[in-house]
Image (cartoon, helix red, strand yellow):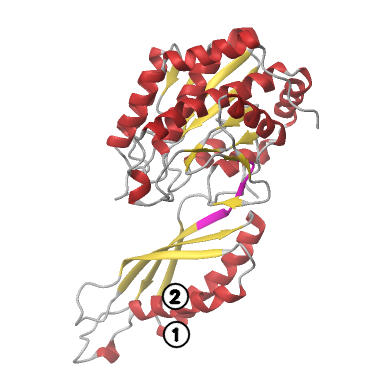
Amino acid sequence: MTAPAPTPDATREAVLHAVRAYAEQLTELSHGLHDDAEPALQEHRSAARVAALLDTAGFTVTRPLAGLPTALQATYGTGELVIAFCAEYDALPGLGHACGHNVNGAASVGAAIGLAAVADRLGITVRLIGTPAEEDIGGKVLLLESCVFDDVAVAMMAHAAPEDSVGASSLAIGAWDVAFHGRPAHAALAPWEGVNALDALTVAQTAIGLLRQQLPPGSLVHGVITAGGDAVNVIPELTRARYEIRAPDLEQLALVRDRVHACFEAGALATGARLELEPHGKDFAELRQDPFLSEAYTAAARSLGRDPQSRHGETMASTDMGNVSRLVPSIHPTIGYDTGGAKQHTAEFTAYGKSPGADRAVLDAAAAMALTAVTAAGDPDRRRHLLDGVLRRPVLDRRPG
């Protein structure tokens, strides 16, 4: 593959100038999202903050979007090549922005603003898509199914992390809400008259624990009990849990899902409880990062003094950006800052979300993504390839699988 051409100096400086001009507002956005952390599908104030800054920057903002009250779209320019940045801003219940979505979201907003400064000269349309509920039901998948990405030629976002990296894949994931329905009875006087829903879940969990040895490499099963009974002296008539299944790709996910489903059926069979399984949200596909865009991003990040490490052949956790990447050439690099050794999804990681390193990560990721877009739009062969890809795109590619 031919190496991406360097960004012309004048265009590069225009992008960097635009990002620097909004540095204070982007930092304030990141901090505001961090301090007012809202969980999935409740990100009303977060979406409003994002929309307000983009409106100030001259974007045309649409919200809500595709029936999602906390989704939004902001557009600048009228060029034929549509380049989108995905902004996440949902937090984790009880942990706040333990995955750094305040950094992710602000960086994408900054990238959109930086690229808007050169949109006319490059003949592009810049789109910022506010994508809620990545930590839960998968807002990007819902937006895909609502055709929001159908004309997008390139999609990008950067994810907060303890280190800079590029090229990794992610695990496909699917989730269930699980319920066992039994029959209550006095736990001492007549326990034999009851059907113990908690026992049913215990049998299922034991079966899953034993199944793990036989799962294919890279497959994971994990869950939490959300209801397990109300009184110790009453046989539990209802238990609830949420379980997630992960695998290297959607195809293997389907196989593992069947095996885990049998474990829940075993709990029902052993106890006489009635099993109820409901999908929770959308399946997330494995992430496929575009090689050309990855190289362009790496070059841009290095020009800013960063050194993203190649993680090709490795996997991170799971993201609904994987579904986007099956339709649209995409990248999802990580942008690093010092977290004292803490990993995502911990209170310790949350504590570093407004650090000077996190603030620099917002601005550097914004500039690197915008410069990546400039490289793709300015390369005649790549531009033609991207535009042809939109024209050839089958509608059914929007769905995973």
> Which residue in the structure is indicated by mark 2?
205
Q: Is residue 152 left or right of residue 362?
A: right
For label 2, the SS is helix
Do the CB atoms of the residues marked 1 and 2 lie less than 8 Å apart? no
Tag 1: amino acid: Ala
Where residue 85 appears, x then y in whole percent? 53, 28
Q: Is residue 62 visible?
A: yes
Tell me the number on the disc at residue 238.
none
Where residue 378 appears, x then y in whole percent? 70, 16
> Which residue in the structure is indicated by mark 1?
270
Q: Nearer the viewer, mark 1 or mark 2?
A: 2
For label 1, the SS is helix
Task: Pick whichever, 378 or 264, lies toward us.
Answer: 378
Tag 2: amino acid: Gln
With respect to residue 181, does 113 lie above or below?
above
What residue is drawn where x is 32% and y is 49%?
95
Quarter of the image holding residue 30? top left
The dominant secondary structure in magenta is strand
Q: Is residue 384 left or right of residue 325?
A: right
Where residue 154 appears, x then y in whole percent? 63, 28
User: For residue 168: magenta?
Assistant: yes
Where residue 166 appears, x then y in whole percent? 61, 39
Q: Is residue 76 visible?
A: no
